[in-house]
Amino acid sequence: MTAKEDITYKGQGGETHQTAGENYETMTTQVGMPISDDQNTLKIGTRGPHLLEDQAFREKLFHFDHERIPERVVHARGYGAHGVFELTDSLADLTRADIFQRVGEKTDVFVRFSTVAGNKGSADLARDVRGFAVKFYTKEGNWDLVGNNIPVFFIQDAIKFPDLIHAAKQEPDRAFPQAQTAHDNFWDFISLMPESMHMVMWIMSDRTIPRSFRFMEGFGVHTFRLVDADGKSTFVKFHWKPKQGMQSVLWDEAVKINGADPDFHRRDLWDAIRMGDYPQWDLGVQVFDDDFADAFPFDVLDATKLIPEEDVPVRIVGTMTLNRMVDNFFAETEQVAFQTGNIVPGIDHSNDPLLQGRNFSYLDTQLKRLGSPNFNHIPINAPKCPFGHLQQDGHMAMHNPVGRANYEPNSHGLGPRENPEKGFRSFEAEEGGAKRRVRSESFADHYSQARQFYLSQTEIEQDHIADALIFELSKVENPAIRERMVSHLPNIDNDLASKVAEGLGMEELPADATPAKEVIETAPSPALSILANAPDSFAGRKLGVLLTDGIEAKLFDALKDAAEKAGAVVEIVAEKVGGVTSNRGRKIEADQKLDGAPSVLYDAVAIIASAEGADKLAGMHVAKTFLADAHAHKKFIIMTEAAQEQFWPAAVNSDLDEGIHILDDPSAAEGFLDACGKLRYWERSA
Ligand code: HDE
């Protein structure tokens, strides 16, 4: 360590403090033996051999060799943050859950966002579902809402999960492709599973290439139960709505971002929280009773179906704010162990067969990953409320029962006891029927909601779905798989089917797959579109400003002020990271060197160039790509007149349009930032 600053380590065993400067604390072994030399192993003579008695060396290497734990079998790549949930509307009328009683009360949370298919080191902008797992440290135990950014799932029964994941991840012989579904095995499996068609529409939509974790929704997916003090139950579905608004990138951007910054989503969350721009989500509930469930055309226990918000409005009950990054990634984000089984009094599971299967899998997987039944002793997993039980021993046990009695009942008057009044009670559902291995008939409609989703999208979004299907299926080598997949599409929409078939170069549409149940028409649900619900705000977004030497600094200042006023972040890009010098000799430092900061990293861009600078940019491939890509990705662009006259024609072979502003005067900056609220100039055909 070279930095001369005080550092406080908040580790699992409390805090350790390192003092700055010459007063570093003495380095020790694990058992506290002071170390005199951490640069050299113990040897005979000056050139060896080594001595086995060198405990300090052996302990250091032994520990290093054991640093890795198995990565999650799914959702391996993830990023976590701490925050608080504040209740804004009491649900005391529907549930006894302590967290939902008192308006204004704050509950600590830990959130982990993730991708599903990629390995731990994979790139952030894979086309993939995002995990959205929240651990609420409530006063009556930890409640884990282990959701996704998509409200439905691929399959209906947990027994198919290993097949789904095997098919989605790298193919077993070649061990590629990494973090993508654009390969034969995935589409082979999917095309044989009509129940996945609704999810297919979602994963081919822009939902799977979010601009960042901050700009996506979250869903509990399954139907759960809220249970009141009298044992009465109401069905519930949970929703997270980002206060920042939703936003996605374009596919061409996703591909390029993965190269330019594979940590794009991680960095975004880290930067936003460290800057104090805390992301927030509203928690909403859709509550409904048995009568609604019985009348709804689909089974509310089927995780491939959603309940449109237009049918059951989302009632907002609180807000989650993420306000603190972890102190240590491994200790917190890697070791956090979510479980669907972690529920609290007042919340209960439904009979959704996917959820029932998950309740087994999450507990099981934590034992494999964390290696001990005591994984809840790790601080990130431990409850923050009082707890007491008689479980003991095992690897790494940190909390053992104190005193003589480790059993119950006992007559020592020791130890915790059950509490019928306060304790968790399952909803007393009347269940019955023969023991059978079946799929309910009520789960048989596979296409109606896929069609509803597709028809609820704007035209731009529908095009993106078709393009994504064409892209993915073009990577499939076996034409029979492509055809089988396309054969499902007419059940969703004929135009979509034709577009995809055409994009794949098929001479004719394959015969339609026969639906198990006839497709029913349902009204479009505008709530399902990202673009129809666009935020009209540039707050929390990033403006990339490419500067050259010789500029008028006042133009840059005006733009920076306007961007900051709009709540956006400005990043300065220049040929050299040392920055540029204005026409009056002012030095402006850059944040990024141009070839390390392509425009795909920004939501809008500015080119502030002097006449000489614009000429220079016109001769640089990387500068031309910066502008050409920003244009092709329909970004709002502002340029100085010199850039427009000398650089633009060299980079872009198109006329200017209303998405392109000229920075001829400082007053132009505000109008540009207002326009940026639309996020993209969709009218541009590029
Ligand atoms: Fe998961 N899932 N899952 N899943 N899942 C895991 O648990 C599983 C499903 C979700 O950030 C694993 O701790 C089965 C739906 C998230 O740590 C594992 C089935 C939804 C995360 C597992 C599903 C999810 C996981 C792997 C079908 C959205 C990451 C590591 C029945 C509602 C949590 C782990 C984190 C992780 C099993 C389907 C969300 C293997 C068997 C549906 C966000 O237990």
Image: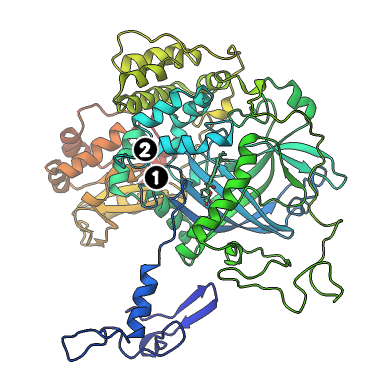
- Which element is circle 1 on? loop
Residue beneath the point at 34% across and 25% down: 473
The kind of residue tagged 1 is Gly
Circle 2/circle 1 CB separation < 8 Å: yes
Can I make out residue 590 in this image? Answer: yes
Number of marks drawn: 2
Give the mark nearest the N terminus, 2 or 1.
Answer: 1
Q: Quadrant of ligand 1?
A: top right
In the rendered image, residue 458, in percent from the top left (x then y), is placed at 48, 23
Can I make out residue 665 in this image? Answer: no
Q: Quadrant of the C terminus?
A: top left
Relative horizontal placement of residue 80, taking residue 416 as reference (left or right): left
Local packing at callout 2 (Cα closer than 10 Å; few below 14, some 14-19, many 20+) is many
Quadrant in which residue 494 is drawn: top left
Relative horizontal placement of residue 15, taking residue 427 as reference (left or right): left
In the depicted structure, whether residue 78 falls above or below residue 238: below
Q: Which mark is residue 118?
A: 1
Q: Quadrant of the N terminus?
A: bottom left
Residue beneath the point at 59% across and 68% down: 394
Quadrant in which residue 315 is drawn: top right
Residue beneath the point at 37% across and 74% down: 62
Relative horizontal placement of residue 188, taking residue 551 as reference (left or right): right
In the depicted structure, whether residue 635 falls above or below residue 376: above
In the rendered image, residue 55, in percent from the top left (x then y), is placed at 36, 84
Quadrant in which residue 605 is drawn: top left
In the rendered image, residue 636, in percent from the top left (x then y), is placed at 35, 37
Mark 2 highlights which residue?
Answer: 180
- Which element is circle 2 on? loop
Question: 19 or 384: which is nearer to us?
Answer: 384
